[in-house]
Amino acid sequence: MELLINQILALEEISAALDPSLEDRDHLNNQVQDYANGFIENTESNKAYFQGTPDKTKLGIGSNKKELKELLDAYTKEVVQKGINPASGGHIGYIPGGGIYTAALADFLASVTNEYAGMYFGSPGAVTMEHELLDWMKGVFDFPQNAIGNMTSGGSIANLIAVTAARDKHQIKNEKVTKSVIYLSPQVHHCLHKALRIVGLEDVQVRMLKLDANFRIDVDGLAQEIENDKKKGLNPFMVVASAGTTDTGAVDPLQEIGELAQKNNLWYHVDAAYGGFFILSESKKHLFKGIGLADSLVIDPHKGLFLPYGLGAVLVKDKEAVFHSHHYTANYMQDATDNGQINPSDVSPELTKHFRALRMWLPINLHGIEPFVACLDEKLLLTTYFREQLKTIGFKIGPEPDLSVSYYWYPSGGDENAFNEKLIENIHADGSVFLSSTKIDGRYVIRMAILSFRTKKETIDKAIKMLEKCVGETKQQLN
Ligand SMILES: Cc1ncc(COP(=O)(O)O)c(C=O)c1O
């Protein structure tokens, strides 16, 4: 026994390093805080995009322990100064991430307290907070309070939960799969195609819908497709609309699609991952009319509420449809179930989950909703400003977007696709502002996606200067 106790005590001494003393914590905290402050103070003068690949020898697990200073150094050089800086206002490509400071503080607390956010029994407070946030979103998006929902890691998993529910509600399995039809916009986010494969619906029939000149679903075209499929004896079961497409910022006609879906008994899913929170903007509210007709809805606070990556949300009206695949119990969980509560783990593939509700709850309560709405309105006006400025330096711009994503290209004459492809290479090499490219109807174009809370008028002016310089370089290189 004495030997055993001595062994335990010896190990206790070594493992104590995992629980630093108050003094050691202060020392670590100060270094990290200084680091964060330096990062934030310099982020706008720094590049938004860094080319180069990380030195993997600096990012592995070494055989010796290291000082925090050395690790932060490696972090700066090999992580922060490689690729896109998503915390920069100069990130105007893809769909920008956020990273507001107070959400980082919430993440710190979530990790320190390590609340178990997967089940009510484990943390009634954390789960209640998640439910309160979901209830708030139900109010915002005109969903009934008895809908259920989940705070996910992002839009892809949220869409996956919705697609699973649609499949289970309509019992799309066995020989029904190949006869069933889903209606999608060619502009739908690719995570929906991915979700179909993941849930075993790779072989359903996918109808790519006609779009109008602004990339919104043509509702008459949709009605016609449904009619044709019914006549062929097929089983139309789901339609997906987007409230903010990733490439073109379009909001589909949500009300009309919803009515058509109801009439034809289709599961109506709305992917509002990018655009959803623009519903809070008075100037855009009208575009979201009918969103409450959806059977399921995805919204991403890590996009439209400027939170750091790692927070999406899904709302679903039919609880049983979601429970069919996600609600389970097991002997080892008998203490935690049977308490009449809806657990996040009943609504998602996750059991253990990061306490991600805190990073939304703390900032909204601390700042109030007003600065979030102002920031969304600001992004919309900056989009108009950017498009106007682009015209003055000779760019052609795509149709006016519903929200804050749009595209443009330089009409160089000759092979315009090759010119714009070279242009984006030069833009990336410059890196002061990050822009991305896409193809629209075969045309190689450059995208703007304005959603970072740090994107300001000054950022747009910088982008315009950079574009002018890069056009000049491209002309020289191709002549
Ligand atoms: C419309 C839309 N849906 C879904 C997603 C996927 O979300 P996530 O990247 O959070 O998984 C995105 C991402 O940009 C998006 O724009």
Image: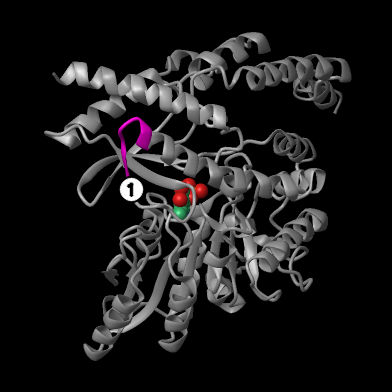
Above or below 179: residue 382: above
Question: In the picture, residue 417 is in which quadrant?
Answer: top left
For the N terminus, the quadrant is top right
According to the image, label 1 marks what residue? 398
In percent of width and height, residue 245 lies at: 42, 55
**Which image quadrant: the C terminus?**
top left
In reply to whether residue 88 is colored magenta, the answer given is: no
- Residue 65 in view of the camera: yes
In-image side of 168 versus 279 (left or right): left
The percent coordinates of residue 429 (x first, y second) are 35, 19
Q: Is residue 6 left or right of residue 53?
A: right
Q: Residue at x 56, y 59 (%)?
A: 284
- Picture layout, residue 378 above or below residue 211: above
Residue 392 covered by magenta stretch: yes
Image location (x, y in percent) of residue 154: 54, 50
Q: Which structural element holds mark 1?
A: loop
**Magenta span covers which residues?**
391-398
Residue 163: horizontal and vertical position, in percent? Answer: 45, 67
In this view, 179 is above or below 269: below
Is residue 50 or residue 211 the one in the foreground?
Answer: 211
Q: Amino acid at mark 1?
A: Gly
